[in-house]
Image (cartoon, rainbow, N blue to C red):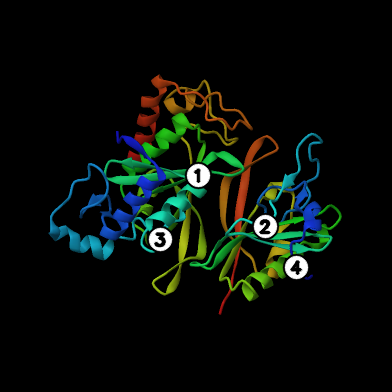
């Protein structure tokens, strides 16, 4: 399972800027040097395609644009929206809770692979008791594959929401419910693992309407949640 | 309807029994008597523009983005002025495109709040773009929310 490491806003801005400027993360492959600690640098033969097709992977990350925004502005934007950015292997993932609905998280990734997103969802499910997720992905971004691979479904298109390269571009809206979440937004307690998931019957079994605190952490459920989200992404 | 800038005497228009951040902020029926009213902050924060519809309500352009030329519209109408929703939206769209020079205006609608969004939004040019399940917590449960937007065609 991919490990998550929290970054402070300055670190996140640094990593995002490095990702975008190097055009690094393309379909989950690091193809050039980045500011990500622990990232492996590939040979220069991969940098060309990366620069040509990459860059876009980090654009639109939680509404930011690391190509046109400098690091101070990136950090200010992430701080303003209360976002948390984590390093997940060679990718960055991030989330911010929605105002008015703290159980729903706005999520983002810089990778086209589902594994970093799966790690983030498992974390949110277990430690923040999130019951649903929302992702805004620029049209044509390779990151859409990561969300599709984790069970996200299209919920609409924001027309001409972003401006870049001299024209306006659409942004795709993806939504997903946390594993084991019922239609009412709470979790199905007392069901078997075959019916829902281990994450749904333990970590968030006490989720109540109107509760905004992230709740307590149950260490023995963390691995179960990881496994549930991972299996969901694989399927 | 004419929109104007905020004055100190308009503070009463910034509080009411509506959902926070709603595109059509109509007074909600059955507002719990002990619940605080929703309050919108007076102008002063960068990235926000607040306009007043005298004696009726307000229109707030939140999250102004000058690169992408867009803003999220929020409105609030005082009890008894519900019929002004359409006029307020049209005035807000006119202000956003004519004065702020925006390209896109969008906002959140909560169908469960009881509003008839299409009747007021479509004449102002808005179209529904996305539906987000569990988008807001209302009346003890998560309910669906929609994103509506209008685009300026130059």
The picture places residue B115, in percent across and down from the top left corner, at 74, 53
Q: Are marks 1 and 2 on the same chain?
A: no
Q: Residues within 10 Å of mark 4 (few under 14, many from 20)?
A: some
Q: The numbered mark 1 sits on a residue in which chain?
A: A
* Pointer 1 residue: A82
Residue occupied by mark 3:
A69
Quadrant for residue A23, please give it: bottom left
* Alpha-carbon span between mark 2 and mark 4: 13 Å
Report how far apart the C-alphas of labels 1 and 2 lie in the structure.
Answer: 21 Å
Q: Are marks 3 and 4 on the same chain?
A: no
- From this view, report whether residue A199 is shown above or below residue B74: above
Image quadrant for the C terminus of chain A?
top left
Quickly name the residue at label 2. Answer: B43
The reply to whether residue A116 is visible in this rendering is: yes
Circle 1: element type: loop
What separation in Å lies between label 4 and label 1 (alpha carbons)? Answer: 32 Å
Asked whether A39 or A149 is in front, the reply is A39
Left or right of residue A34: residue B120: right
Which mark, by number, is residue B4?
4
Drawn side of residue B59 relative to residue A69, left or right:
right
Residue B100, compared with residue B22, is above or below; it is below
Name the subunit of mark 3: A
Say which quarter of the image contains residue A46: bottom left
Q: Earlier in the sequence, mark 2 or mark 4?
A: 4
- The quarter of the rendered structure image containing the N terminus of chain A is top left
């Amino acid at each position: 399972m991919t490990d998550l490491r929290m970054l402070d806003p300055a670190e996140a801005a640094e990593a995002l800027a490095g990702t975008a400027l190097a055009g690094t993360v393309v379909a989950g492959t690091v193809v050039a040097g980045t500011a990500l600690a622990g990232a492996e640098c590939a040979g220069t033969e991969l940098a060309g395609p990366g620069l040509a097709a990459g860059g876009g992977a980090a654009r639109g990350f939680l509404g930011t644009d690391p190509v046109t925004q400098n690091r101070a502005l990136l950090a200010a934007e992430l701080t303003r929206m209360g976002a948390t950015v984590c390093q997940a292997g060679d990718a960055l993932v991030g989330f911010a809770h929605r105002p008015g609905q703290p159980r729903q998280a706005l999520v983002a990734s810089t990778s086209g692979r589902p594994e970093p997103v799966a790690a983030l969802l498992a974390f949110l499910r277990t430690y923040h008791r999130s019951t649903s997720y929302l992702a805004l992905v620029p049209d044509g971004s390779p990151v859409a594959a990561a969300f599709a691979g984790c069970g996200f479904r299209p919920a609409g298109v924001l027309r001409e929401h972003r401006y870049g390269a001299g024209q306006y571009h659409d942004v795709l809206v993806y939504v997903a419910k946390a594993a084991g979440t019922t239609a009412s937004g709470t979790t199905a307690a007392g069901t078997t693992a075959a019916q829902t998931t281990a994450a749904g019957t333990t970590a968030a079994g006490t989720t109540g309407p109107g509760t905004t605190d992230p709740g307590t952490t149950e260490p023995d459920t963390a691995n179960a949640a990881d496994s549930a989200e991972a299996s969901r992404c694989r399927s | 309807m004419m929109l104007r800038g905020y004055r100190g005497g308009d503070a009463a228009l910034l509080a009411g029994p509506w959902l926070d951040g709603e595109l059509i902020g109509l007074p909600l029926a059955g507002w719990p008597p002990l619940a605080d009213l929703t309050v919108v902050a007076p102008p002063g924060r960068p990235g926000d523009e607040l306009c007043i519809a005298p004696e009726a309500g307000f229109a707030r352009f939140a999250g102004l983005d000058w690169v992408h030329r867009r803003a999220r519209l929020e409105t609030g109408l005082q009890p008894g002025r519900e019929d002004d929703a359409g006029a307020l939206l049209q005035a807000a769209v006119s202000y956003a495109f004519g004065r702020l020079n925006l390209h896109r205006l969008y906002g959140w609608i909560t169908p469960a709040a009881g509003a008839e969004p299409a009747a007021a939004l479509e004449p102002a040019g808005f179209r529904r773009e996305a539906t987000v399940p569990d988008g807001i917590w209302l009346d003890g449960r998560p309910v669906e929310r929609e994103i509506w937007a209008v685009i300026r065609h130059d």
